[in-house]
Image (spheres, rainbow, N blue to C red):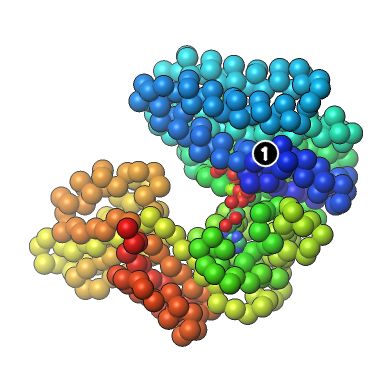
Amino acid sequence: MKVFKFGGASVKDAEGVRNLLNVLNKTGNSNLLIVVSAMGKTTNALEEVVEAYLKNGNFREKLNLIRNFHQAIISKLFPEGREEISGKTEVIFTTLENFLEHNKSSKYDFVYDQIVSYGELLSTTIVSGFLEKSGVPNKWLDVRELIKTDATYRDAQVNWEETQYEIQKNINPNLLTITQGFIGSDTNNFTTTLGREGSDYTAAIFAYCLNAESVSIWKDVPGVLNGDPRVFQKTQLLEQISYEEAIELAFYGASVIHPKTLQPLQRKEIPLYVKSFLHPEDPGTAVSRGRHLIPQVPCFIVKKNQVLISLSSLDFSFMVEENISDIFRLFHLYQIKVDLIQNSAISFSVCVDNKFNNLEKLMQHLRARFKVEFTKYVSLYTIRHFDEKAIKSLEKDKEVLLKQLTHNTVQMVTRESK
Ligand code: ADP
Ligand code: ASP
Ligand code: MG
């Protein structure tokens, strides 16, 4: 079997869904499982519904925008006979509205997962219906019955044993399967999500459990480049990357592949192809066993909107194991993701990602024990396989707050320009 993943950009409008069919016509669709993300920026729009809902704001208005967006796509894809598909998407909206009406929980992460998961349910319903009417029979599956996780909402951890069991029991390799990325369910059957951009990971979970031949993720770029083309100029296509190198790139923040995607594939040596959905015949990038990096060029990664925190003790003691382990316990408690660490005898600096918005709470705790300084709005740049020229090109015009060099990686924290 093969596994394909189509991300939000590939199905952002009716044209995108038609193009998905075009890709399948070129690649063939037998023995295939397709994972689809929410259309375009739907997940962001649903995040706004969550905010408004929990703050007693006008979430209905926001939900209506999402409804209209999907309805507009449906009317373009189904100029005639759209009743069946509209009926199905309306059922999905009604289920969401029922949740919003009856829910009693104010736990942000829980409510978040119950709401944002609807983007994928909608997109897959539309894609599946469109393929069906275009003469491509397929089976739509609710992935929440297959991917079982713990109850860490917004960052759910996969229960591999149960997931493997359900996937092998329920997937018929002879049919074309269409299912959702990003979401799963816990032991109480509440919906969970695997973390933003988690659909790549879903594809890898299926590939692992099905012993798939390969995974292809279809993107709006020719493959993995040596830098995000939205940020860096004159980027080059990477033709081949080893699993180890791809794990490093994704871990440092190359957002073209979700970082959790690679290890399950590496375990079974399943190749991952990153390809252009506009030019499906082009080779793209292969992540597989073999040469580390072809061509061997510096790779640039940036994580924006990070926070640099510097801590020193209040009582002149050194920053050693005991202090540092306490600090990390707090990071873990507040789901602060640490990107970079630098310590000296009297100070300890970390660059962190505040994606769960717990920074203020963390600060209160830290201030009780440490002298704390922090700078918001910093960027963390990483260059793998750097050379002098690459470092110079980055340092130009930037205020570097911290720099760290290892054998083949340099990292710099810089102040973001206003
Ligand atoms: P999806 O539609 O699957 O969600 P994403 O938007 O998550 O796709 O990923 C594709 C985007 O990733 C590209 O448009 C590009 O801007 C960005 N990107 C970041 N780093 C890289 C890189 N090293 N190579 C290619 N694209 C990258
Ligand atoms: N729709 C989800 C997101 O936007 C998952 C994904 O696209 O991979 O984060
Ligand atoms: Mg994405």
The residue closer to the viewer here, 15 or 251, is 15
Give the vertical position of 301 relative to 393 (above or below).
Answer: above
Spot occupied by residue 371 in the image (x, y as percentages of width and height):
15, 59
The single residue placed furthest to the left in the displayed view is 315
Spot occupied by residue 143 in the image (x, y as percentages of width and height):
67, 34
Density class for disc 1 (Cα within 10 Å; few <14, some 14-19, many ≥20) is many
**Image quadrant, ligand 2:** top right
Amino acid at dot 1: Asp
Lateral position of residue 27 relative to residue 42, left or right: right
Query: Is there any visible trace of residue 51 in the rendered image?
Result: yes
Spot occupied by residue 329 in the image (x, y as percentages of width and height):
32, 52
Give the vertical position of 269 relative to 153 (above or below).
Answer: below
Quarter-of-image position of residue 415: bottom left
Secondary structure under the numbered disc 1 in the rendered image: loop
Lateral position of residue 54 relative to residue 114, left or right: left
Query: Is there any visible trace of residue 35 in the rendered image?
Result: no
Identify which residue is drawn at 19% across, 58% down: 372
Which residue was labeled with disc 1?
A: 13
The residue closer to the viewer here, 285 or 405, is 285
Identify which residue is drawn at 63% across, 80% down: 296
Identify which residue is drawn at 73% across, 52% down: 277
Looking at the image, how many numbered discs can be counted on the residues?
1
Q: Does the residue labelled 1 lie within 8 Å of ligand 1?
A: no
